[in-house]
Image: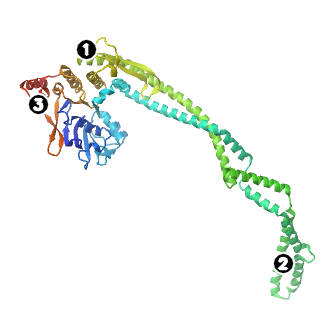
Amino acid sequence: MLIHLSIENYALIEKLDIDFSEGLSVITGETGAGKSILIGALSLILGKRADTHVLLNKSKKCIVEGSFNIENYGLDNFFKKYELDYENITVLRREINKNGKSRAFINDTPVNLNLLKELGDKLVDIHSQFNTITLNDSNFQLAVIDNYINHNELINNYKSEYFKYINQKSKLKELVEKENQLKTDQGYFKFQFDELENARLIEGEQENIENELEILNHSEEIKSNLFKASQLLNNDENNLINNLTEVNSLIHQLAGYLENIKEIDERIVSNLIDLKDVADEIDKIESQINFDPAQIEKLNNRLDLVYHLQQKHRVTSISELIKIKENFSGKLQGINSLDENIRKLRTDLNEQEKTLKNLANKISQNRKKAIPEIEKNIIKILSRLAMPDAQMKITQSNLPDFNRDGIDKVKFLFNANKGGELNELSKIASGGELSRLMLSVKSLISQRNLLPTIFFDEIDLGVSGDIAGKVGDILLKMSKLMQVVAITHLPQIAGKGNEHLLVYKQTDKDSTKSKIKKIKDQERIKEIAKMLSGDEITKAAIENAKELLATEIN
């Protein structure tokens, strides 16, 4: 429960500290004094977004801090899940600087706004006049039923499976669209792949072809030169090898006389051997060179194909063409594997739908079973709120498909008068009737699904007199189960509070500030008397205030 609230530089509040107690606390004050500002400040530490408009002094930051006793509320796992320090007295803090930037903290650990809101939703339920309007909303009506049943684990399991189902449907749709697009392109991919595949491209062949063509195109010149070289080396009458052989014979005869001639003789022999090898190699190469027009045409055709494919795909090498072919092959294989993935995903989706349907049916059955109890209990509470002839009916029908809450659509039908025709709340209920109906709903839920604290901002809208007292009785009864804080303008409700907080304005020549204080005894009697009679407090109002404060719930 909320045990302390500190507000600094927010709206009309310069600095304010409030302690809260168990039971029912009432907050009163004149119109415009700042009662609802407290709700606004509290909302900040519960995750509501804010901007610089909340700053009283635009040069300073706004700080709102709330201390909550969370012992025995089973929140340990929440703190473990998000690796936060658990404290029985947990502090939520929000800071908004002059630029509108916000920071949030849980027990001095910085957290994002969503995390702050997630914890805030587990600590405080704030009911404002706007929430009475949401009573007409079908999603809120469904939440009322689920909160009454308190089958949270089942609901959470369903939502987990639902979002998995939605993700699978989205993925299937994406794959089908991708498959359709690929199949549109499949013919193009296959033509390009077949053309490259049929070309039987080989790494390095372009260079080999170009080299071979260079030789064939100059074969006559090459063969002629090689022939002449061969003649000069070995075939002419006066060829180099014969001449060198004769030189070798002459020098060899002198090797026995001159020592240095011996080395020359060895060198001539070595050169003669090399020259004969060169002559043999030239003859061999010359014999292999032939002018072949058919081979030239074949190679030119092959090279033209390579050049055509390179120009078409805007590349300059066969290795790049091979990579492009592999890419087309991958796309064609991808289409085939995509078909398999789609078949598997459809099978998984069917299984997921069965799981989801099973959970949704269980939820639907729980709701169907609970609806008569809810109708009965709300009518009973409305009777206590001076609406003895009120009729309440909740219809339940099936949706055409799953949504995040199941397969049910519910509708609250209502009529405050005996024999009147049941109709939707927005078409038939007055403001006061809606307030009493919402209080009945909140009272019912509080008995089944406890939150530590609930704030009511003028739940008494449109009620007065004896009915106001009955509203106070219900609030007091709720406060036996949870902490209840009610902002009210009715003395009948203010008199029911275990604790009374007064919001008032303090004005000086430069500014107006909102203040708050706890009042009791004579000061409280005086405040309630003022609510009864206005600024001029009468003796009768004083006595009436004493009676209201002495009255307890039956």
How far apart are the alpha carbons under marks 1 and 3? 36 Å
Tell me the element at label 2. Answer: helix
Q: Is 4 placed above or below 283 here?
A: above
Q: Tag on residue 535?
A: 3
Q: Earlier in the sequence, mark 3 or mark 2?
A: 2
**Which quadrant, please, contains the C terminus?**
top left
Mark 3 surroundings: few (<14), some (14-19) or many (≥20) residues within 10 A: few
How far apart are the alpha carbons under marks 1 and 2? 137 Å
Which-is-in-front pick, marks 3 and 2? 3
Residue placed farthest to the front in the image? 509
Q: Nearer the viewer, residue 399 or 475?
A: 399
Q: Tag on residue 269?
A: 2
In the displayed structure image, the side of residue 421 where residue 182 appears, left or right: right
Q: Tag on residue 388?
A: 1
The image position of residue 533, as x and y in percent, is 12, 26
Q: Is 234 placed above or below 317 here?
A: below
Tell me the element at label 3. Answer: loop
The image position of residue 435, as x and y in percent, is 27, 24
